[in-house]
Every structure is written in structure tokens, then in C-alpha cells.
Image (tube, rainbow, N blue to C red):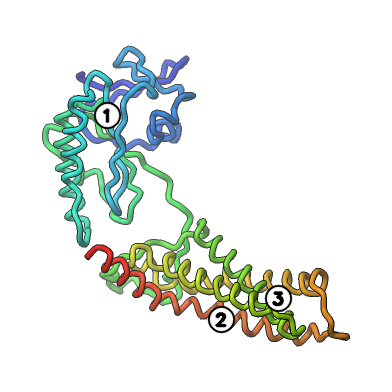
Amino acid sequence: MSSLILGFINSKEELTFENKVFSITDKKVIQNLEKANYKNADSLLVIKSLNNLHISDVIQIRINLTDTGTFLASFQKETLTESNREDFLKQIGSLKSEGTLNEEIQLKKVKELMKILGNFQPIYVSFVNSGAIKLTLNDFTIKNLKFPLLVLAKPKKKSLNFSFIRGKTKEEKPEETNYSPIDVFNLDYFFIFLFSLFGSIGIITAIFEIMNKQAIGIFLVILSVAFFVTLSIAMSLTIYPKGKLRHPLLRYYLSIFILVGIVIGIVSGYFISSGLLKTEIENFDYKKLILLSSIISAVVLISTVWLSIPVNKIICKIKSKKKA
């Protein structure tokens, strides 16, 4: 096939690609190309150069390159058959390697991957550079590329810039260590907030039952400890994904979510204690309850910000022993 022509059903618009690297910025095209074909049943995208072959009727192989991104290779059913698919997957699997990854190593893998893919004649290959290792279009410059490589330009996530805190000037040299930007919000932050919330509820209700001289207070203490341990692990995995520090200021940003969880947890725990739990003590001192639980919750739960350091070391040791 001399060139790839994509189009949309009931539209005269056509996109023509030769066997080289292209940067795709059109949101409509990206939305259709980034999805696996089994999710594209309702797509209007067709391959006009292959008799209007629908995008969901091709065979697709997803190839994840660690810390770099995802390649999605699309083949005709007649090209990638059951007989040669095993050989294809075996060659792709040979690119896996252990140890520290960097831009040079991953770039070498990309070029080897392009050669392997070319031997199996894909219709096209799309790529999303979603990892920490960033590649430019020039990095994909490969002689005699046998298929169109469509690099999908994804919009950047909202992130926080803390450079002003350090008062960095233009004359300063950039740090050798490259940290990932801090997302304004993601699901990990929500779980940290949630564990802080339940941890503080557990602490205030435990203190209430202990002051009330009820045996269930011991169970609530154990429950609070469980949330504390879970929060410590969650903090470590968020700050140190894959054992490496994401950003030195992330722990301080996450402390905001912990504090919000503590405040909401104390308020919720107060209403639970005063409204739902029974007390045998007349004129129960709720002010003392709130003061004690607030101090203990703040000290215990905020300590996970720094406990994430030794917890990460423990997790890394456990993983290294399993590999050994």
C-alpha cells in the first residue's frame, strides 16, 4: 500500500499519510486512533485506502514501553495471521529488559521495535508518549520506515509549578534530576483523603468509647491503626511510584488532603459519638473529646508524610527479595 488514507463515514474529509512519522493534533482523529478497536464499534473512522475498512475490523496489538508510552499497531486480518502472530509476539517480547531505564535505552528499543513492526506490514502504528521519558519527532527518524507512524499529541494534564518557592533565577542551571510534575488532582489523592477521613473518625470514636469505659474502644483503636498503616503505604506509593521520588514537594501538597480528611473526620466523628453512640457518663465532656482527638489525629496521620520515606525503603527491599 503506497499511502494510508483515513476518512469518516458520511464525510468528504480525507487524511493521507505516507510511510513516515506524523504528529496528530486533531482531537477528533486522536479520539478514534487512541482507542483499541474493540472500543471503536461506534466510530465513524474508516480506512479509505482499504475499501473503507472500518477501524474496528482491524487486528490491533498494544505494546507498552515502560516509562515511555504506548504503541498501538493495526494490521489487516490477512497480514497478521495465527501462524505468524506467535513469532511477532516473541520478537516483541525480546525487547523486554530489567534494570534502570533511560532515554537512550528506550530510544534504542523504539528503533528496534520499528524494524520488527516493519517486517509484519502494519497498516499504521499510533503512539502516545504518556510516560516520564519524552521523545521528539526527530527521535523517530528511521530510514526506510515501512508504515505510517502516527504520534498522537495528547493535551497536558493540569499540574502545579512550585519553582517560585525556591526563587529560581534564569541564570541557574537546571537540576540533573528530572521530576514528574505534580498533578492538581488524581485518584491517589482521593484515597489519601479517604484514609485520613476514616482514620480520624476511628480515632475520635475510639477515644469516645475509652472515655466512656467501653470495651469496643480497643477494637476502634485497632481499626484506627489499620487506617494509619494503610495511609502510610498509600502515601509511600504515591510519593515514590516504582520506588522513585515523583517530586520532592509532593509530600507537602498531599498533607493538604490529609488535613482536610482529618477536619471532616473529626466533625463526622463528633456527630457519630454524640448522636449515634450511647454514653453512660452524665455531662460527657465533648470539648475534651474533640481536643484530644484533634491533637492525636493531627500528630499520627500527618506523621505519614515523613513515614513514607522508611515505608518506601521497606517496600523496595521486599520487592528486591521477591525478584531474587
Q: Which mark is residue 205?
A: 3
Give the Cα separation between the discs numbered 2 and 3. Answer: 15 Å
- Outermost residue, front side: 215
Question: Quick one: quadrant of the C terminus?
Answer: bottom left
Question: Quick one: quadrant of the N terminus?
Answer: top left
- Outermost residue, right side: 282
* Residue marked by disc 2: 300
Label 1 CA crowd tier, 10 Å (few <14, some 14–19, many 20+): many
Kind of residue sitting beneath label 1: Tyr
Say whether marks 2 and 1 touch (CB < 8 Å).
Answer: no
> Relative to 85, does residue 248 appear above or below in the rendering?
below
Q: Which mark is residue 124?
A: 1
Q: Which mark is residue 63?
A: none
Q: Position of residue 111 (x, y in %)?
A: 16, 43
Side (left or right) of 245 relative to 159: left
Front residue of 312 and 264? 312
Label 3 CA crowd tier, 10 Å (few <14, some 14–19, many 20+): many
Q: Earlier in the sequence, mark 2 or mark 1?
A: 1
Front residue of 301 and 258? 301
Say whether marks 2 and 3 touch (CB < 8 Å).
Answer: no
Kind of residue sitting beneath label 3: Thr
- Looking at the image, is mark 2 or mark 1 nearer the viewer? 2
Q: Earlier in the sequence, mark 2 or mark 3?
A: 3
- Looking at the image, is mark 2 or mark 3 nearer the viewer? 3
What is the tally of numbered marks visible in this picture? 3
Residue in the picture at 84% in, 85% down: 281
Residue in the picture at 78% in, 71% down: 271
Whether residue 214 is visible, yes or no, is yes
Residue in the picture at 44% in, 72% down: 249
Q: Position of residue 206 (x, y in %)?
A: 68, 78
